Amino acid sequence: MNRANTGALGEMAVARDLRERGFSVTAANYRCRFGEIDVIAENQQYICFIEVKTRAENSRYAPAEAVDFSKRKKLLAAVQLYLSQYPTEKQPRLDIAEVYMRLGKVRSIHWIENAYDGDGR
């Protein structure tokens, strides 16, 4: 399975998990000049901007480690642009979803809610 297929499977699993938790998925693969936001979802209180990282279960590094400071700054710029285009009263939340796979199937999803703040830290 190639990287694009693996990433797409992870993003679909995250969207399904969000719907099961009472969120509505507002957008997937939102692209702008600053980059891409994998999944945008909302519930009554939050609008969540989710970076999905998919890895094999036996991966040497945690998927969230791939979301370094530079990547977070680009994501924040994309979030700010999105919110300027689609204003909301909901509290923004910046999450990372770590998706673990084995033998081409999603095994688990680890959520890191409020993974970083508006300064990218």
Image (cartoon, rainbow, N blue to C red):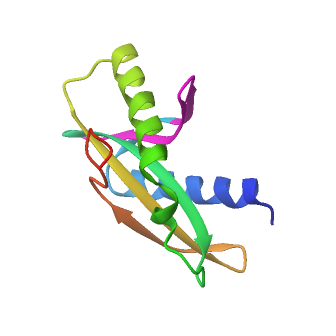
In this picture, is 80 found above or below 117?
above
Q: State which region is magenta.
A: 28-43
Q: Is residue 37 magenta?
A: yes
In this picture, is 14 found above or below 26?
below
Q: Could you tell me residue 23's position as x and y percent? A: 34, 46
From the viewer's perspective, is 21 left or right of 108? left
Q: Could you tell me residue 90's position as x and y percent? A: 21, 31
**Residue 118 occupies quadrant:** top left
In this picture, is 80 found above or below 101?
above
Residue drawn at point x = 36 percent, y = 25 percent: 80
Q: Could you tell me residue 81's position as x and y percent? A: 41, 21
State which quarter of the image contains the N terminus.
Answer: bottom right
Q: Is residue 92 magenta?
A: no
In this picture, is 31 found above or below 5?
above
Residue drawn at point x = 66 percent, y = 53 percent: 8
From the viewer's perspective, is 38 left or right of 104? left
From the viewer's perspective, is 10 left or right of 41? right
Q: Nearer the viewer, residue 21 or 62?
A: 62
